[in-house]
Amino acid sequence: MKSEVELRAGIRAKVIQLCRALGKKTTDIKDDDILLEKGLLDSASVLELIVWLEEDNGVELDPGELSLDNFGSISRMASFLAVQR
Amino acid sequence: MPFPIRTPRVNNNDDAVRLSAILVQRGTEVRAGDPVCEVETDKATFSVETEHGGYLLQCLANVGDSVEVGSILAWIGDSASEAVPKQTSHQSQQTVEPTLKAALLLAQYGLKADQVPTAAGRLRAEDVEDYIRTHKVEPRSSAKTATPSMTAFPPPEVASNIEPLDMLERGMLRTVEWHRDEAVPGYVEIAYDPEPWELYAAAFQKEQRTLLSPLLGLLAYRLVKLCRTNPKLNATVHDGKKYLYRPVNLGFTIQSGSALYLAVLTSAEEMSEKDFVNKLADLQKQAMKGRLQPSQSSGATVGFTSMARWNVARHQPVLPPHVSFMVAHSATVQGLAAFGATYDHRLLTGADAVIALNSLKDPQGEI
């Protein structure tokens, strides 16, 4: 089972990959950045990230859990997933 | 009475899938909804479930076989000893209905479909080409094809490594050839102010507390509503007849990695705005997981596509087979935004398309 630190590193790598696919700069991404608000990712990319999170961590997320509080930033995602398992 | 399990369409681009696993042994009892086997494309794996309870009588293909979408994959019987209907082996139960390209070649060479053998569910152009080559058939002198056939062009002369097309490439070929050979596509574009839509989507997002922007879903839902007041947007022409579709099956393009899917929300006209947006998000998720059901990847009657995420300011979509109206949403660049639409000019005029696009401009305007 991955620690929160490992989760955060994995999510960060995936976010960077998705940002690059959209042609965004990835040098200034912070773990607490709200990805949608900062325009780093669009909705389809966030959805792709969620699908990846589910498959990478073997979880099925309830639509009601998909909120900014839980999935707004890299840190929030890592914290949420660490608590869930 | 035995029930057939037909090979599902895993996505809109693949006319054949590969049998990757048989999950149930012959003679084993199964319940409705049980997975019986798995099929796959290059991009997705899909469990094939039985709609009827009973016993697996026979799987007609072997693991690793390529199986045509729609062909009988297996039989379920009321008892384990029930006989499998005759003439249903994987190879022999196929029909000889030709594809459009094959039909053109048949006409060009004066051949009939039942003359040409095929191992697939439909008679394909390559089957006809093989037959022509093997039997040294000459084209009829008076034969005219509606469009240049593939055989009319010599192969490229540049040194090449020649490979067969993969399934996605074949599917895309089918789509673009329908667009070229059957539809008469036109394209129109109008400018609009994106701010009302952005405000409408933001209010919806706040009220529904959604993580993802509902903008594209809301736009697509308005297109669905437009189809109810203008049935010609949700129609096609085939063989000289107009087909006005009863349901509105919204085709929505989803890019997942390098795969492009046209996911389909069937009977979208029956959904509320909120349900539609939620179901579309779920459909996107399923597509990204490669888990689209056959009914979720075929049968589109109208289409919506967006390339805004790549900051594309203008794009002209290809019409999916039997779709006459496909809306193109693009990025807002320097405050300017545009809706485009590819339309089948056999059924719609440019004015029809523009009127429809104008009705999309205002998220809350009367339709």
Image (tube, helix red, strand yellow):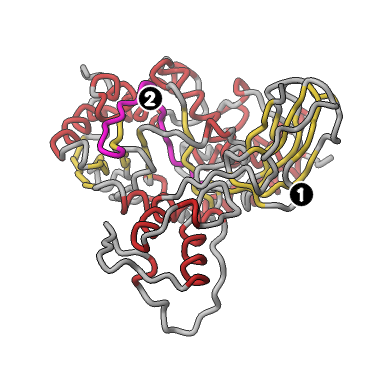
Quadrant housing residue B225: top left
x, y (%) of residue B246?
Answer: 36, 21
Judge by depth and name the residue closer to the eye, B220 or B70. B70
Q: For the C terminus of chain A, which image quadrant?
A: top right
Q: Position of residue B169 (x, y in %)?
A: 50, 57
Q: Which stretch is magenta?
A: B238-255
- Say left or right for B348 vs B102: left
Q: At x 73% / y 42%, what residue is drawn?
A: B60
Within the image, what quadrant is residue B8 found in? top right
Q: Mark 2: which amino acid?
A: Val
- Residue B63 bears which disc, if any? 1
Residue A73 in the image: state x and y as whole percent.
59, 37
In the rendered view, does B344 fall on the left or right side of B260? Answer: left
What residue is disc 2 on? Answer: B248
Decide if residue A12 is in sight here: no
The Cα atoms of the two marked residues, 1 and 2, are separated by 37 Å
In the image, residue B251 lies in the stretch drawn in magenta: yes
Assign a secondary structure to mark 1: loop
Instruction: Give the residue type that dot 1 points to.
Output: Val
- Look at the image and tell me whether residue B95 can be seen: yes
Indicate whether B24 appears above or below B365. Answer: below
Where B167 sits versus B252, above or below? Answer: below
Please give the name of the residue rendered at 70% of the width and 29% of the height, measured from the top-left corner.
B49
Residue at 69% x, 34% y is: B48
Which quadrant: the N terminus of chain A? top right
Answer whether residue A4 is magenta in the image. no
SS label for mark 2 = loop
